[in-house]
Amino acid sequence: MHDPISDLLTRIRNAGQAQHVEVTIPHSRLKEAVVRLLKDEGYLNDVRVEGDKIKSLKVGLRYQGRRSVITGLRQISTPGLRRYVGAGSVPRVLGGLGVAVLSTPKGVLSGLEAQKQNVGGELICYVW
């Protein structure tokens, strides 16, 4: 796998379109931080780490009726072209209705939290 973040976003997108209750994703600390942020923002129901030697993430998806709460995911920074933003230029997603996910020196933060803490970093993805 060349791009683990792309794999994470694709698995969540496909599981939401297929109306699965949960999805299993290979574990990494970055992926765990991203899905925990999405859980805190209200896009996911549950995040569990399973396994001892070979870990995996069990991510519970959230729905409103029959529609997934996550209507869109877009990866911004890729392995071939990293995108960085400063503390003052963190973008708003859909006029504040979505969330920008950043990898900063203070950990993985939402765009709003990064602005509050006055830090910039790598712009990983947009979720709305």
Image: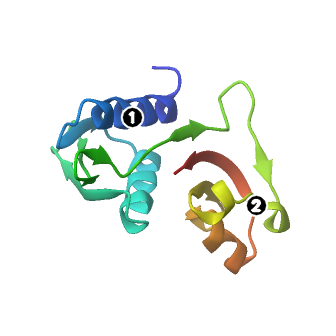
User: For this rendering, which residue is in front, 5 or 125?
Assistant: 125
- Whether residue 93 is visible, yes or no, is no
Image coords of residue 106 (percent x, y): 61, 68
The disc, 1 or 2, on the residue closer to the chain's N-terminal end is: 1
User: For this rendering, which residue is in front, 92 or 95?
Assistant: 95
Instruction: Residue 55: give its label.
Output: none
* Above or below 107: residue 125: above
Scheme of image coloration = rainbow
Give the amino acid at mark 1: Arg
Image coords of residue 88 (percent x, y): 84, 68
Circles 1 and 2 in contact, beta carbons < 8 Å: no
- Farthest bottom residue in view: 116
Instruction: Residue 90: give its label.
Output: 2
Which residue is located at x 58 percent, y 64 percent?
110
Within-10-Å neighbours for mark 1: few <14, some 14–19, many 20+: some
Quadrant in which the N terminus appears: top left
Residue matched to label 1: 13
Image coords of residue 36 (percent x, y): 38, 60
* Above or below 24: residue 117: below
Image coords of residue 4 (percent x, y): 47, 31
- Farthest top residue in view: 1
* Quarter where residue 79 is shown: top right
Give the amino acid at mark 2: Val
User: For this rendering, which residue is in front, 61 or 59?
Assistant: 61
Q: Is residue 44 left or right of residue 73?
A: left
Which residue is located at x 45 percent, y 36 percent?
9
Mark 1–mark 2 distance (CA, rounded to whole Å) = 24 Å
- Whether residue 16 is visible, yes or no, is yes
